[in-house]
Amino acid sequence: HENRWLRIVGVALAAMAPVFLVELGSSFNDVLVSLPAVAAVLLLLKAGSRNWGMVLTAGAMMGIATALKLTNAPYVVACAVAAAWVHESPWRARLAQMVLFAAGCALGFLLAGGYWSYLLWREFGNPFFPFFNGIFQSPDFPAVSLKHERFLPQSALEFAARFG
């Protein structure tokens, strides 16, 4: 019974968070896209060392989240590593969980974003247009890598400070 109240309070606090309130009624999709990403993490934590179906489903959910918003891609890597280390098991089982999670990600990405990626490829020659145009070199956009230099560390000390 106490667990139920903790859940209710947790949801109420999350609903009152400024970021959530600002996004209500706007065109931002961060809160909505976070749902499959959080579901993936929960499934990984509940999966145990032998529940391959949950690991595959977790991967599919993270793939869907990434298809909906490409900035979720770093979490794919983090969750794939977590899939291998979250539960104690022999190294082969850990590797299998990692591969299964990655396969689920690919499947989820294809289901949620495959058609859109195909349309972008057909129209612009780049399935992630305009991103990664330094690689795909679509003539419809400068062949540059879109990144914000201001977020990159300028020194070794700045880099180390990010982990402290």
Image (cartoon, rainbow, N blue to C red):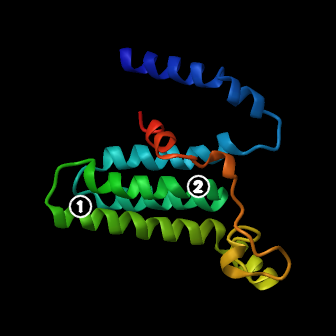
Q: Position of residue 100 (x, y in %)?
A: 35, 67
Q: Is residue 15 visible?
A: yes
Task: Give the labeled residue for mark 1.
Answer: 94
The residue under label 1 is which amino acid type?
Answer: Arg
- Residue at horizontal 70 percent and vertical 52 percent from the top: 148
Helix, strand or loop for disc 2:
helix
Quadrant where the N terminus sits is top left
Task: Report whether 35 appears left or right of 6.
Answer: right
Q: Quadrant of the C terminus?
A: top left
Residue 65, percent from left and from top: 58, 55
Q: Which tag, 1 or 2, sits closer to the chain's start?
A: 2
Q: Who's the residue at 59% across and 19% down the image?
A: 12
Q: Which mark is residue 153?
A: none
Which residue does the image show at 51% across and 70% down from the upper left? 107
Query: Residue 108: x, y in percent?
Result: 53, 65
Does 146 sit left or right of 46 as displayed? Answer: right
6 in relation to 104, above or below: above
User: What distance separates the C-alpha of mark 1 from that of mark 2?
Assistant: 23 Å
Within-10-Å neighbours for mark 2: few <14, some 14–19, many 20+: many
Q: How many discs mark residues in the rendered view?
A: 2
When the figure is inspected, residue 26 is found, relative to residue 1, above or below; the finding is below
Asked whether disc 1 touches disc 2, contact meaning CB atoms under 8 Å apart, the reply is no
Is the residue 99 above or below the residue 47 in the image?
below
Nearest to the observer: residue 96 or residue 128 = 128
Which labelled disc corresponds to residue 65?
Answer: 2
Within-10-Å neighbours for mark 1: few <14, some 14–19, many 20+: many
Q: Hey, which residue is sitting farthest left in the picture?
A: 90
The amino acid type of the residue labelled 2 equals: Ala
Instruction: Name which quarter of the figure residue 11 lies in.
Output: top right
Can you tell which quarter of the image residue 77 is in?
A: bottom left
Which is more toward the observer, 6 or 128?
128
